[in-house]
Amino acid sequence: MSETRVVVLVGSLRADSLNRRIAELLVERAPQGVTMEIAEGLGDIPFYNEDLDRAGEVPAAAQALRQLVDGADRVLAVTPEYNGTMPAVLNNAIDWLSRPYGAGAIKGKPFAVVGVTPTPYGGQWAHEHARRSATIAGAIAPDDIAFSQTSIDVDVLTDEEVVGRLIAAVESLVAVEPAPKAA
């Protein structure tokens, strides 16, 4: 059986972001048969603008993201919540992955969202918005695959219960069947 490839989109650009460190932990502790890779350089991608999205003229960082996701089997977003929604960098990545309309790199890919944020709702709104956006872009984003840490009262990187729940979310994502490829 071949490896399942999961691309990880990190919604925080901060170098020492807790969500970045969670993504790195998941890459290190990926379940057997799963290879995970963090999509680097999301901050280098210009805001989506159809004027920039022309054959042969797509910005290199956006093209690299599209190719990475196109070659993956699944997509996992690991993100905090900013002002009650997903960070702009994550929204922008989904925008670029949604094009060309109806045939973007994210189309038919299982997609899930996890993350930690020090808010009373644990990032649930950001996760909900990211799932909705990815679904509109053509991804398969079941709303029952989620993990939101509602407070940072434990060290989420060393608490085995929390880590286990994060890994379980990855396992659930891997279990989702992708859409059949169009012939």
Image (cartoon, rainbow, N blue to C red):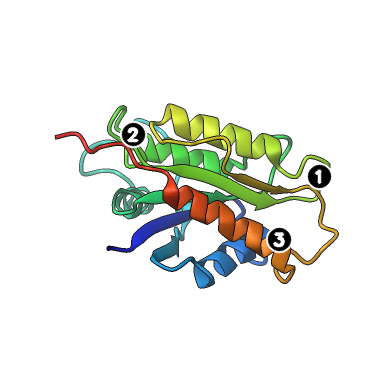
Viewport quadrant of the N terminus: bottom left
> Reading the chain from its start, which is encountered first: label 1 or label 2?
2
Q: What element carries label 3?
A: helix
Q: In this view, does 150 lie above or below 85?
A: below
Residue type at numbered disc 2 = Arg
65 or 21, which is in the foreground?
Answer: 21
Q: How far apart are marks 3 and 1 (CA)?
A: 17 Å
**Residue, x 50% and y 55% (percent of image)?**
171
Viewport quadrant of the C terminus: top left
Provide the residue designation for mark 3: 162
Provide the residue designation for mark 1: 119
Q: Distance between the residues labelled 1 and 2?
A: 32 Å
Q: What element carries label 2?
A: loop
Whether pointer 3 and pointer 1 mark residues with C-beta atoms closer than 8 Å, the reply is no
Query: Is residue 108 found left or right of 175 in the rendered image?
Result: left
Query: Is residue 16 found left or right of 172 in the rendered image?
Result: right
> Reading the chain from its start, which is encountered first: label 3 or label 1?
1
**Residue, x 80% and y 50% (percent of image)?**
118
Provide the residue designation for mark 2: 99
